[in-house]
Structure formats: structure tokens, C-alpha cells
Image (cartoon, grey):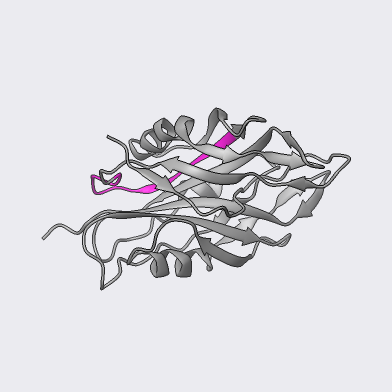
Amino acid sequence: MHSRVSLAAAALTGAVFAAAQGPITPPRLVAAELGAAPWNVASGGGIAAFDVKVDETGAVASADVVQDVPLYGGMLGEALPSWRFEPAKDGGRPVASRVLVLGFFRPPGLTFAAPESPRYKNTVAPDEIPWPTSVTAPPYPSNAVGSGKVVLEAEISDSGTVTGTRVLTSPTPFDGASAGALRQWKFRPASRGNRDVASRAFLVFSFVGLTP
């Protein structure tokens, strides 16, 4: 059974939109199904990412895998079709858009060894969306108990640095660790017309409860 996560009306998207005649307003995420059960159920973890196409009504038209990490990517992918957006607008007119949705699935345990050659460094992502080149895993907070999921928005400059973060879900003990780690991430910036541009990225950080 899924639990609905209602998100604040905040700008979402790791997408950079194609050039158009009028100013384009990015879509806003208004509701997301993330599921009540912990996503990270084994000793692994990693990053799963999707290139999501949002139609003019705000519905998810498709979600193409950019990088997968079984079984967690499948859990995120199954949830995406039910997500709802306020559609992007071009001069006030609703338009289709592309959104990067990235899930970071933290392995259980207070500490864990980072892979020597993480997959994201060799993944080829579409030029229109930013892609991480350096990732910092959030620590499991000392004041947290159990599992949790945090939805964040990151402002990414045209040089690939994170210039701001925003937590979009209701407050949890995992928020500070998630936002603090995300501020240390580096990205290959999005590109439009062969020019690097600033963008936003939309991320889900998943924590699993520690096993005694």
C-alpha cells in the first residue's frame, strides 16, 4: 500500500527545457507516491535515476531509466506513473517537459565503504539534464530511528555546483543529513544549445533503519 506524500508548491526539476519563444516556468511537483515500506531492504544501495517526461496536463507520460540499481530502481520506477505535477508553462501556456528524478538509496549501517568506481561516474546521461560527478552519502542521523525518505530540490549552477537546497516533504530527522550531503554534490551541468546552463535537480534520499 502506498502512502501519499504531499509536497509544497515548490519548483521541481532537474530538467532543462528546450528553447522557446516565451519564458518557461518549470513544473511543480504536487503529489508523489513513495510507498510506506522501506525501499532499502538489503545490504546494498546506490543511485537510480529516470528521465521523466511530463505532459501538458502534469501527468507522467513516460519514465526512461538513466541508471538503475536493482531492486531499488524498480521501486522508484513503479511509483513514478502516479506522480502529479503542475505542468511547465511557456508564456503562460502549459507545455510538456522533461524532469530528472534521482533516488539515492543509502545502505543500512552507521558507516559503509564507498565503491571505488561508482557507476554514476561512467553513466552517460542526456545533455539536457545535469548529472552528478561527485556524490557524498548522508550519514545516518544520531537522533533518527527507523527508516525514512526525504524529497529534495537542488539548485545547480552552470558550473555544476549546488547553490541551494530545499526539503519538499514534511519534516523528519533525516532532513538535515540529506540536505547537508546534497550541498556537497558536484554535477556536470545541464546544457541547452551547446551552452551550460543553471538548472534544478529533484532527488529522493532513502534511509533504512539500522538492524540491532
- In which quadrant of the rendered image does the C terminus lie? bottom left
Q: Position of residue 131 (x, y in %)?
A: 60, 50
Viewer can see residue 124 = no
x 58%, y 36%: residue: 51
Identity of the residue furthest to the left in this view: 212
Q: Quadrant of residue 55?
A: top right
- Which is nearer the eye, 207 or 66? 207
Tell me, yes or no, whether the highlighted magenta stretch contains residue 57.
no
- In which quadrant of the rendered image does the N terminus lie? top left
Q: Position of residue 53 (x, y in %)?
A: 61, 32
63 to 107, vertically: above or below: above
- Which is nearer the eye, 172 or 146? 172
Viewer can see residue 156 = yes
Q: Which residues are magenta?
A: 39-52
Q: Position of residue 106 (x, y in %)?
A: 34, 54
Q: Quadrant of residue 96?
A: top right
x 41%, y 34%: residue: 79
Identity of the residue furthest to the bottom in this view: 142
User: In this rendering, would 125 be left or right of 147?
Assistant: right
Q: Position of residue 31 (x, y in %)?
A: 47, 43
Q: Quadrant of residue 123?
A: top right
x 71%, y 45%: residue: 16
User: In this rendering, would 16 be left or right of 146?
Assistant: right
